[in-house]
Image: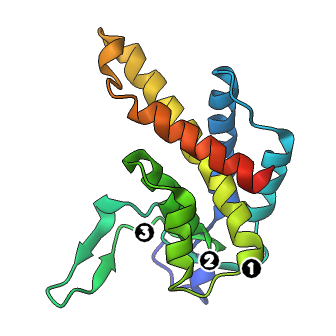
Amino acid sequence: MHESAASITDVLRPLGDTILPRWEACASALRATGRAAPQAWHTAAEFHYRSDRPAPLHGDLSFANLARRPDGTLIMFDASALLGPKEFDAARWSARLAIAGMSPLDVFARWCSTEAIDASTAYELLGVECVLEAGSLEVQRLQRRSSSLTPHAIDPLQYVDAAIDNLIHTAHSLLG
């Protein structure tokens, strides 16, 4: 474990090995609630998560692992040590902000305006991440429901429903 590595890619985990099983579980959770998750979406997930253009990724970028220096510079920490398409972090971040009522497409477009990203495939990866995030929200809701005595208190303002609808709509528009 503490041996030196010839390259950083020798110590990073392939994104597909890590994320595809989770993506499949999330797609299954969506199907279990009557939402569509077509086979073509799985094919897109497999293609993007197993990219032949790997780059080091943060992997689970969220507000919880961002900080700002006194000079205003943003710092990311607690990386997941993953290797995959460089567009992944932008797609993951954009999909995760749907719970805050933000459009994944708008957030992604803003990210793409500041970083060189391959737009020909990046938006399809965003669609794949929207499916994963929608399924993750559904799984979290089911877990809360099973541990709660008051199911109506889980999402009283329907933020989760609105976010899932937003994410699925975005996935449909990007993946077909």
The quarter of the displayed image where residue 122 is located:
bottom right
Residue under label 2: 86
Question: 122 or 52: nearer the eye?
Answer: 122
Q: Position of residue 168 (x, y in %)?
A: 63, 42
Q: Dots 2 and 3: beta carbons under 8 Å?
A: no
Residue under label 3: 79
Question: 92 or 170: nearer the eye?
Answer: 170
72 vs 86, left or right, is: left
Q: Secondary structure at mark 1?
A: loop
User: Residue at the location (32% across, 65% down)?
Assistant: 65
Residue 86 drawn above or below residue 137: below
How much space separates mark 2 and mark 1, taking CA atoms?
Answer: 8 Å
Question: 120 or 162: nearer the eye?
Answer: 162
Q: Secondary structure at mark 2?
A: loop
Say which amino acid is labelled 2. Answer: Lys
Q: Dots 2 and 1: beta carbons under 8 Å?
A: yes
Q: Secondary structure at mark 3?
A: loop
User: Residue at the location (30% across, 81% down)?
Assistant: 74
How much space separates mark 2 and mark 3, taking CA atoms?
Answer: 14 Å
63 vs 94, left or right, is: left
User: Residue at the location (35% across, 26% down)?
Assistant: 155
Q: Position of residue 141 (x, y in %)?
A: 44, 27
Residue 131 drawn above or below residue 156: below
Residue density around tag 2, few if under 14, some if 14–19, many if 20 or more, within 10 Å = some
Q: Which mark is residue 53?
A: 1
